[in-house]
Image (cartoon, rainbow, N blue to C red):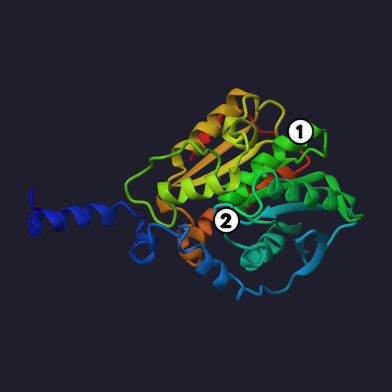
């Protein structure tokens, strides 16, 4: 049946109104699908032009490095945010988040260590995760690091790696991070559907990203959402948009953390799509989203920190 012009306009208006008012122009310009096997080489070529700025770069060997950002005033034993960039496990680099990492360092007064891990499909699981383990171990060895106040965090696939790193640290008896800062984390390879008004990351992207990362690995071992025992993990903050493919898997993970006795706050931004805070960083909704993250980290770094184990969806 052919859709009339009036019906088409009404449908378009409904789709438009599904986005946060601050993000409607960005939603108009943003693609639904950020990467495919065909576009992967082009995106990687373009990403080589990202130089970053203001970071101390430390080579950890084997193509792995960290970018270090320090606040203006550094205590003898400083809290650290170990940050992991996004990109669906297949694209991206640490330098793309330099401005964000500098904002975290200045706002929180902590040292930020940003991990440049190796990408799939050339380097599938467990290589990217082990690169992050190496970065964590390097961070702990630094004399200015307070090992009792290390936050692991990231965005999208980087947040998925941060969640996996928290699990790996627990299982190996490594230093226990004090907090997980998970920004729209990519946690579950089984996600095949989501909200109607997606941008940047859709089910096809998700299948490609996960298949590239997993390679021949057992998903039961490699995928954070498939971990059967979440007890003993650090408290977590999870932030996600209402128009994000990962909305439901993030809600499910937050509830499972709380059920396991792990304090977790779930922050849902109505009308926001995946990566909204990066493509529209100057918008009011993105600035509030950033400040909400910082408030959560501030709270957990206070000596009198206390947080119950219930999920707060706010």
Q: How far apart are marks 2 and 1 (CA)?
A: 26 Å
Task: Looking at the image, tell me whether mark 2 or mark 1 is earlier in sequence order.
Answer: 2
The answer to whether the residues at label 2 and label 1 have Cβ atoms under 8 Å apart is no
**Which disc, if any, is residue 170?**
1
Secondary structure at badge 2 equals loop
Is residue 109 visible in the rendered image? The answer is: no
Image position, residue 9 (x, y; %): 15, 58
Vertical arrangement, residue 47 with respect to residue 89, above or below: below
Q: Residue at x 72, y 28 (%)?
A: 232
Disc 1 on helix, strand or loop? helix
Q: Pick whichever, 258 or 217, lies toward us.
A: 217
Label 1: how many Cα within 10 Å (few below 14, some 14–19, many 20+): some
Residue 69 coordinates in the image, percent (x, y): 75, 64
**Total marks in image:** 2
Residue on which disc 2 sits: 90
Seen at 71% across and 48% down, the residue is: 127
Residue at position x 65%, y 28% from top?
A: 230
Would you place residue 151 above or below residue 264 in this image? below
Q: In this view, does 186 lie to the left or right of 308?
A: left
Q: Is residue 83 above or below residue 210?
A: below
Q: Residues within 10 Å of mark 2 (few under 14, many from 20)?
A: many
**Outermost residue toward the front?**
216
Q: Is residue 248 visible?
A: yes
Which quadrant of the figure has residue 311? top right
The image position of residue 87, as x and y in percent, is: 56, 56
Q: Residue at x 48, y 36 (%)?
A: 190
Closest to the camera, between mark 2 and mark 1, is: 2
Which of the two residues, 190 or 211, is positioned nearer the viewer here? 211
**Front in this rendered view, residue 304 or 44:** 44
Percent coordinates x, y for residue 156 in the rendering: 55, 50
């Amino acid at each position: 049946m052919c859709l009339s012009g009036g019906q088409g306009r009404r449908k378009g208006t409904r789709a438009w109104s599904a986005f946060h008012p601050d993000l409607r122009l960005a939603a108009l310009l943003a693609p639904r699908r950020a990467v495919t096997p065909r576009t992967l080489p082009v995106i990687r070529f373009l990403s080589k032009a990202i130089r970053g700025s203001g970071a101390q770069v430390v080579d950890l060997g084997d193509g792995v490095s960290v970018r270090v950002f320090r606040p203006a005033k550094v205590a003898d034993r400083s809290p650290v945010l170990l940050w992991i960039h996004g990109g669906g496990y297949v694209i991206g680099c640490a330098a793309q988040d330099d401005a964000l990492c500098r904002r975290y360092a200045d706002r929180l007064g902590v040292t930020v260590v940003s991990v440049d891990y190796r990408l799939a499909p050339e380097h599938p699981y467990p290589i990217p995760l082990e690169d992050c383990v190496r970065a964590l171990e390097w961070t702990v060895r630094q004399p200015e690091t307070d090992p009792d106040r290390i936050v692991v965090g990231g965005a999208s696939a980087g947040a998925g790696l941060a969640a996996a790193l928290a699990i790996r640290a627990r299982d190996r008896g490594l230093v226990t991070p004090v907090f997980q800062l998970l920004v729209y984390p990519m946690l579950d390879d089984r996600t095949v559907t989501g909200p109607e008004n997606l941008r940047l990351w859709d089910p096809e992207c998700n299948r490609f990203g996960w298949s590239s990362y997993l390679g021949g690995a057992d998903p039961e071992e490699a995928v954070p959402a498939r971990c059967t025992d979440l007890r003993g993990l650090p408290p977590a903050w999870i932030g996600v948009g209402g128009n994000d493919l990962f909305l439901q898997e993030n809600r499910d993970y937050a509830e499972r953390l709380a059920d396991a006795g792990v304090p977790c706050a779930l922050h849902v931004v109505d009308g926001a799509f995946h990566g909204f805070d990066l493509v529209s960083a100057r918008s009011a909704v993105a600035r509030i989203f950033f400040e909400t993250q910082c408030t959560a980290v501030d709270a957990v770094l206070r000596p009198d920190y206390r947080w119950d184990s219930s999920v707060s969806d706010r």
